[in-house]
Amino acid sequence: MLNPFFKNNGPFKFREILKDLNLKFDKKNEDLIINDIKDLQNSQLNEITFFHSKKYKSIANNTKASFCITTQNLQDELPKSCKPIIVDNVLVSTSIVTAKYYPDSISDNFDNSVEEISKTKFIDNVKFGKNVLIGKNVSIGLNCSIGHNTIIEKNVSIGDNCSIGSNTIIRNSLIKNNVKILDSCIIGKHGFGFFPNNNQNLRYPHMGIVIIDDNCEIGCGSTIDRGSMSNTIIGKNTYLDNQIHIAHNVKIGENSIIAGQVGIAGSSVIGNNVKIGGQAGISGHLKIGNNVEIAGGSGVIKNIADNSKVMGYPAKNIREFLKDNR
């Protein structure tokens, strides 16, 4: 499920990976086959992963990958079954290797395979407005509607009883049943992933997808980026208000409510039954627990435990905030 829409050009021999990274050959292992690249948590035997921050130490300790792109300082955190590949810049090196396996996941040019819905197999079972375009490898369930000027680009699966608004673009996404996506949304484009390297920006491949689970609503003008090396997920019965940005790899749990103009940075995990007030911002790579309430306008820069209520910048316990601001 991780990357059903992007072709893996592997496997590659270990020496090919080392060559691309301008590293010395390892004669003992140079002919070993590496099937795929995945993150620390999902990688398996004969696959390569990356480890760039102590924040992921506990996951690195238990990775099943055979190879890991990392630094001299972090290599001892890997299990003995995982061979470290020492580099100066882990993220740039990972980008190079990911592009080798998934070259189609870098560019996000417009989909020139689309055609008018009236010329497709969906003409009789989808209610649609004017100027609706459909790409290749698209499936649409029963009792669905699509508004004017909307483009369902390649690699999209839409379940039953879904409503897609006008002026919306969707690609590389799995949308389940009873989902409402309102007007002017962008879903499944690549995220803001790049690294400055020698006076140029190196674009990071995004081989993940967007998964929107049953009974969700996505408000007008919202953007949900697809994952880079994992998927971006919106859990069941979660409602997003208008003009919300969900960055790559973010995972939002079930039954959550997020008000307008909230921004959630990449790879943060939001629990179940979470409420986030308007114009709040959540930094990347954070864990927000279950049953958390975040007041509008707050800035969250660290993890938040279950059942917490926070407010302010930086966000802290709401009673503490009110006490400090009498």
Image (cartoon, rainbow, N blue to C red):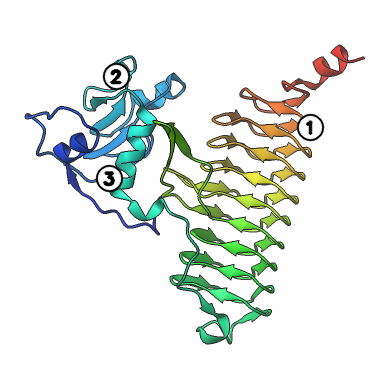
Residue in view at x 32 percent, y 40 percent: 96
Mark 1 crowd level (few <14, some 14–19, many ≥20, 10 Å Cα): some
87 sits left or right of 213 in the view: left
Q: In this figure, which residue is indicated by the disc labeled 2?
A: 75
Residue 159 percent coordinates (x, y): 56, 67
- Location of residue 44 by image quarter: top left
Residue in view at x 61 percent, y 44 percent: 246
- Location of residue 116 by image quarter: bottom right
Q: In this figure, which residue is indicated by the disc labeled 1?
A: 297
Q: Amino acid at mark 3?
A: Asp
Quick one: which residue is furthest to the right in this view? 326
Real-space Cα separation, disc 3 to disc 1, in angstroms: 41 Å
Q: Amino acid at mark 2?
A: Gln
Marks 2 & 3, CB-CB < 8 Å contact? no
* SS under mark 3: strand
Residue 227 percent coordinates (x, y): 48, 46
Real-space Cα separation, disc 1 to disc 2, in angstroms: 40 Å
Q: Amino acid at mark 1?
A: Gly
Q: In this figure, which residue is indicated by the disc labeled 3?
A: 36
Question: Looking at the image, which is closer to me, 133 or 43?
Answer: 133
* SS under mark 1: loop
Residue in view at x 78 percent, y 23 percent: 312
